[in-house]
Amino acid sequence: MRIIIYNPNSFGGNFQYIKELFSYLKKLGGVESAILVLPENSDYDTPGNIKLLKSDLVKVKAPLLRKLYFLYRTFASPLVFWKWLRQQPPSFVIFNDYDQWSSWFTRFFFKTLRNRHKYGVILHDPDRDDYTPFTWLSRYTMKSVMSYIDVAFYHEILPDRPYYKKNIPYINVPQGIYNTATAAVDQAFYDLILAHKGNMKLLAVIGNIRDEKNYELIISSLCDLQGVKLLVTGKPASSGVPTETYRKLILDLGLSDRVMWEERYLSDEEFSAAIVASDILSVYYKKTFTSQSAVLNSIAAFRKPVLIADTRSAMSVLAKRFAIGAVIEAENKEAFVASVKQIMTDEKDYTDNWNRYMEYCSWDSCAKIITDSFLHLRSTPVSAKA
């Protein structure tokens, strides 16, 4: 088996996911070679890594120019990949991410190689109706993505959407556990957090700063959570994240002494320090968030209780199944406050529940599900797709 993985991003949750999965795919028996195709600016270097795709970072700050460059690489990267793919022997090709905006055009190119390669896609965010400003356009472009795919992988939930046709297999594959717990704790950062925490309990929101994480609700909830402080760490996921609005809210509510705001990229050692120092972790996303979050599987190994919104997402499904924390009605401040108080009071040990969760989400299992699914396709004739 020869595996090729297309990943047009050099950072973010999908990038962290594919680095882990790639390392396990290479180890599996029967995999003679595995190649990970990345942007030319990626700083990830490992055997089997090729940097062909257009850079996903641009130095210009003008919003219009940034958007234009995004559109350019959305068309250019898949075409660069297709040209390179033409020279490769028969392989199983995995799209860990896909360029949805350009799919109506690039699908014709990838279809020309379907007699040579088998295509798979990992649907980290399976509900694509709101990807563009218009539902009809989102559905059209997503249908274009799926038009050349032979097998699709999803995490726990696949919504009923017209672009998920029934003539290909859809396979549930868990998201693996990230090995952040193996990193040594950054002692200086740990001590800094403990100084902020003092004798109070610490609620933390870890990872890339995204509006979907409900910062305004969480910050305002501190007014009803005496004895609790808040830690926010991470780098803004995009230039559009309103971090200034969040910081202003902290000032307006007089909570400056109760919130530690570390707006920057954290090393693995600092990430570990932040989680070890915290008492409870929030992945309380808004209703609009329906995918899996890499943050949940990054904090799993620390076995801390979590707060998760009850939405149609893989996180909510798994949190209920394995009882790893509180699953709360989405965007409900009163329910959020009550759940924080309940977890702080109960001080329940979640170790066994997290152990069962981690066993289910092992990377070995994820890699084997994917390779077994491709092997099943080997004897399956290519069907015509719209």
Image (cartoon, grey):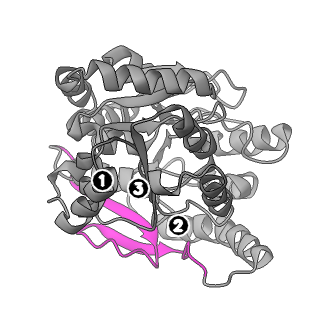
Nearer the viewer's eye, disc 1 or disc 3? 1
Q: 10 Å neighbourhood of mark 3: few (<14), some, or many (≥20)?
A: many
The residue beneath circle 1 is 274
Which x, y percent locates residue 304? 27, 34
Q: Nearer the viewer, residue 316 or 263?
A: 263
Image location (x, y in percent) of residue 52? 47, 75
- Quadrant in the picture for residue 299: top left
* Mark 3 to mark 2 CA distance (whole Å): 10 Å
**Is 37 above or below relative to 130?**
below
Query: Label 1 to label 2, Cα distance in Å?
Result: 39 Å
**Residue 302 spot, x, y in % from top left:** 22, 40
Q: Can you tell which quarter of the image residue 55 is in?
A: bottom right
Kindly identify which residue carries mark 3. Answer: 5
Between disc 1 and disc 3, whose residue precedes?
3
Q: Position of residue 360 (x, y in %)?
A: 25, 26
**Can I make out residue 98 in this image?**
yes
Residue 48 is covered by the magenta coloring: yes
Q: Does the CB distance between marks 1 and 2 fall below 8 Å?
A: no
Is residue 203 shown in magenta? no
- Residue range in magenta is 30-58
